[in-house]
Image (spheres, rainbow, N blue to C red):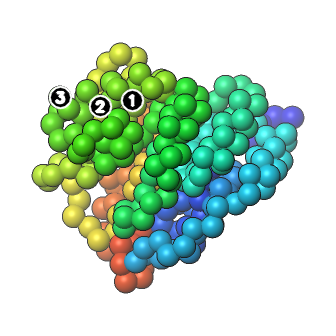
Amino acid sequence: MTKNYTTVLTIAGSDGSGGAGILADIKTFAALECYGLSVITALTAQNTMGVLEVYPLDEKCIISQFRALSSDISIDAVKIGMLASAEIIRAVSLLLRELKGNPPIILDTILGSSGGRTLLSPEAIPVMKKELFPLAALITPNLPETALLTGMKRPPATREAIEDAAGILLESGAASVLVKGGHGEGDECSDCLLSENRFFWFHSKKIMSGNTHGTGCTLSSAIAAFMARGESTKSAVEKAKSYITEAIEAGAAFRLGHGNGPLHHCYRVWR
């Protein structure tokens, strides 16, 4: 049977407000002309004000979701988001090793919410590094996550410190590392990609917006979509950065809820 779609699978938690997690991923895939598939790892009660509750799903449920899809539909790329527990990490690792075709895996190392709620226990971090880093074509930690993953006392703040941290993460097993600089100071967002033994820096103007919920989820999903379409890691990051900058700009005037609202994922098709 002829394949009609480029497919991207997201393995992540569900955000009912649509700004982050599975819902943001699916919207991003669609906006970038990919067909989205999903395996839900956890349900959350959250809105624009923050995450109220997290309900991890049973590993058997996650395994069933994944195998139902992989047994029927070919997958061109995988994006991994919130995993919630060490047990879920181990289950996902097992499942990814079953995938045919060696699709690129983009791991968004979600350790906590932007509001400060812990979404992965400290005890599970070594499990993530051991089980998932070696499978990932790219990991995408932000500056605070980079500090936690490398054991640094504080997030790296200089170009040299960020490159050093990226090198440490690369040695943990991932094929490429993108250290996201959105949490840095100043009016510019600078992201550092370490891929194929080279550093690439991507700079964009920091957009002052009250609607930035889900930027990390959206960026990693956009990268996965572009890689599914055959782009190199560097090209996928470059194009994803452009997309998310425009989505933040378009979402700056978006009004939803009373807190940190979402990006405008579908700005290219909405009139």
The earlier-in-sequence mark between 1 and 3 is 3
Can you name the residue that lies furthest to the bottom here? 258
Relative to residue 213, is residue 66 depicted above or below? Answer: above
Relative to residue 18, is residue 134 depicted above or below? Answer: above
Q: Nearer the viewer, residue 73 or 154?
A: 154
Mark 2 vs mark 3, CA separation in Å: 9 Å
Residue type at tag 1: Leu
Quadrant of the drawing holding the C terminus: bottom left
Q: Give the percent coordinates (x, y) of residue 30.
A: 58, 54
Residue 220 image label: none
Quadrant of the drawing holding the N terminus: top right
Residue type at tag 3: Glu
Q: Which residue is mark 3?
A: 160
Residue at coordinates 31% horizontally, 48% vertically from top-left?
Answer: 144
The image shows a total of numbered marks equal to: 3
Residue at coordinates 23% horizontally, 45% vertically from top-left?
Answer: 154
SS of the residue under disc 3: helix
Residue 54 relative to residue 4: left or right: left
Residue type at tag 2: Ala
SS of the residue under disc 1: helix
Residue 125 relative to residue 5: left or right: left
Mark 1 vs mark 2, CA separation in Å: 6 Å
Residue 169 image label: 1
Q: Is residue 151 shown to the viewer in this render?
A: yes
Q: Give the percent coordinates (x, y) of residue 54.
A: 57, 68
Q: Give the percent coordinates (x, y) of residue 190.
A: 23, 41
Asked whether the residues under the numbered discs 2 and 3 touch, taking CB atoms below 8 Å apart as contact, a structural biologist would say no
Label 2 CA crowd tier, 10 Å (few <14, some 14–19, many 20+): many
Q: Nearer the viewer, residue 125 or 139?
A: 125
